[in-house]
Image: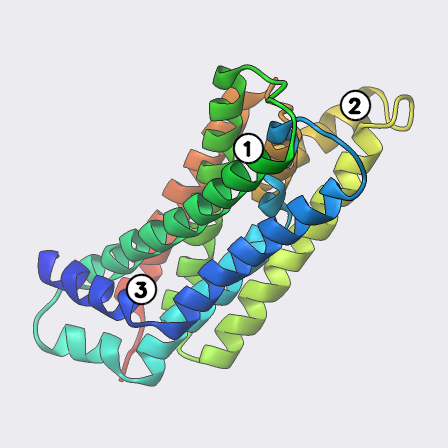
Amino acid sequence: MGKLLSANFQRLWLNGTFWVTVLVIIGLESTFCLKLDDQGSYPADMLLLFFFQMIGVVIAVFSSLFNGTEYQDGTIRNKLVVGHKRSHVYFANLVTGFAAVTILFLAGVITGSVLGGLLYEPVQNELGTIVLAGGIGWLACLAFTALFNLVGMLSASKATTAVICILSAFILMFYSLSHYQQLIRPGVVTGTKRATYQFLLDLNPNGQLLQAMSYDVDAAGRMILFSSAVVVLCSVIGVFFFRKKDLK
């Protein structure tokens, strides 16, 4: 699988879409930071993770175009023709996606750290809480990547992959925002309904990002477990069906 990873990373470094998405994350975080600076003084950690609001959509765009190009150019079929195992091809793409998304994540964190340190007050939360929130957000990004990698590896159409991934990202965003807004308002939802909404929010990668952005990490263990489960489940399902996929 080493040769597959080497080829994938070489393609990643030369991929224009990847570098555009890096610039988009930097631009989003910079815009959020500068816009909030006009509204008064805030602790630096308040804006450190603002890019979490849109990173799911950015990951969807990158993953769908990166994987879709492999089918469009015949790269995946060529890899199989020269003797690479289907499982190796699948996991090489997944690992490449993890690396790319980690770079996107770090680009946002570094941008927020620099601008926060220059423009805002000292951090309010403890370092451990900030690191935990960042870790939850990073794992949620990996969960998004595993989900979109599954779609991209099973769909041979670049356009179809893009539509499914981007639409899914917006749907997950919409539902997470809806659940989160109701949960943070006292008395709006109670009892079993509140527990259900909280469960769905914790399960949703975008819901995890919203909570991490607000440093609401009381359910950290459950969110980490859910993200890990999504990664494993999507990988198992993806490899299973990719092995059976007709690539002729």
- Report which residue position mark 3 lands on: 242
Quadrant into which the N terminus falls: bottom left
Dot 2 crowding, Cα within 10 Å, few <14, some 14–19, many 20+: few
Q: Nearer the viewer, mark 2 or mark 1?
A: 1
Residue 188 rendering spot, x and y as whole percentages: 91, 28
The type of residue carrying mark 1 is Gly
User: Of the numbered discs in the image, which one, if any, rests on residue 192?
Assistant: 2
- Report which residue position mark 1 lands on: 117
Of the pair 208 and 9, the residue shown nearer to us = 9
Q: Earlier in the sequence, mark 2 or mark 3?
A: 2
The residue at the point 16 percent across, 74 percent down is: 79
The type of residue carrying mark 2 is Thr
The answer to which quarter of the image holds residue 13 is: bottom left
Mark pair 2, 1: CA separation: 42 Å
Of the pair 34 and 162, the residue shown nearer to us = 34
Q: Are marks 3 and 1 in contact (CB under 8 Å)?
A: no
Residue 180 rendering spot, x and y as whole percentages: 75, 35
Relative placement, left or right, of 133 versus 184 is: left
Q: How is the image coloured?
A: rainbow
Quadrant into which the C terminus falls: bottom left
The residue at the point 56 percent across, 52 percent down is: 56
Does 47 appear above or below 147?
above
